[in-house]
Image (cartoon, rainbow, N blue to C red):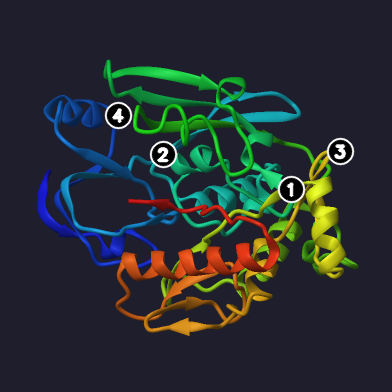
Amino acid sequence: MTQTNVSLKNYNTFGIDVTSAFFSEITSEDQLISLLHELKNKPFRVLGGGSNVLLTANYEGHTLIMKNKGIEIVEETDEEVVVEIQAGVDWHQLVLWSLEQDYGGIENLALIPGSVGAAPIQNIGAYGVELKSVFQSCRAIDLETLTHKVFYKEECEFGYRTSIFKTRLKGKIILTAITLRLKKKPHQTKTNYGALQDALKGKQHTIQNVAAAVMDIRSSKLPDPKKIGNSGSFFKNPILSIKLFEEIQKRFKKIPFYPEGHDRVKIPAGWLIENSGFKGKRVGNVGCHEKQALVLVNYGEATGTEVLKHAELIQKEVLERFNIPLEMEVNLL
């Protein structure tokens, strides 16, 4: 059922109060295709959990919210299980389900806000693990032909916080379901990432313990979007050439880094922002969180434009101080 002039405040984790002229919740592929036929040549956009977007203006088109649910095992061996998950499933609920079933592979991705359908677009990642490590395929609707398509892992062009769905296919398809290949038997967990390694000292590295440690770490330093508006990490961690990094390291000897392949280095964006003076800094209704500078927050009735201006100020200061450009991780709408 289509609604008109709907506030999207409760449909984005920043809590930005903008309206959409038309609004529908999608509960099945058939409903989606039917509505897309009606919307041919009319403006529309799709939101998942609204956790990786910044809404900057009212929208005169039709906003579609993916609410299709369901988790189904489609293939199984003694060692692995292939699971199909509908796009409208909450990502963290999927992680909790996998822990209950004792299926490993996504425990490091616990407590990431958002929907399953948005996960491949961003190639979500945390604590040394990315979605692509367990991804098998996804189902989508081609917006030109309104037919079903399947994209396998090798076709998705996964990179650091990106994919083909964020680049060449942006605005050309709608993801409706994904399939993941998870481990059934206890497997080698990835625990060598900074704070996670410390949190697990003296504990067995089970998937449940890893997930619990991740949730504790995230809860201790990241604000709950239900209490204070935010979209998690606002910027990507910059990846630099070894040569550029070494030049910067001469001036900033304590700059932290993580090897990224044999010739590149990843720098924590939060450290750059904090050391540019923004951690806990507030300007009106917008600021950087007091515990994690990488997280921009809406302290009250901030507009998307106010958040964007603060983000651009951060980019300017970091570039001037470190000669490192920061790229926004959130999508601007």
User: What's the distance in space between the residues labelled 3 and 1, CA to CA?
Assistant: 12 Å
User: What's the distance in space between the residues labelled 3 and 2, CA to CA?
Assistant: 36 Å
- Foreground tag (2 vs 1): 1
- Foreground tag (1 vs 4): 1
Reading the image, the residue beneath label 4 is 29
Badge 2 or badge 1: first in the primary sequence: 2
- Foreground tag (3 vs 1): 1
Please, what secondary structure does the residue beneath circle 3 have? loop
Image height of 244 relative to 285, above or below:
above
- Foreground tag (3 vs 4): 3
Q: Are marks 1 and 4 in contact (CB under 8 Å)?
A: no
The quadrant in which residue 263 appears is: top right
Task: Classify residue 175 as left or right of residue 240.
Answer: left
Query: Which of the numbered marks, if any, corresponds to residue 240?
Result: 1
- Residue at image location 34% in from the left, 24% down from the top: 141
Reading the image, the residue beneath label 3 is 262
* Quadrant in which the N terminus is drawn: top left
**Three-letter amino acid code at disc 3?**
His
Number of callouts in the render? 4
- Residue at image location 63% in from the left, 45% down from the top: 101
**Three-letter amino acid code at disc 2?**
Ala
Q: Are marks 2 and 1 in contact (CB under 8 Å)?
A: no
Reading the image, the residue beneath label 2 is 87
**In front: 331, or 95?**
331
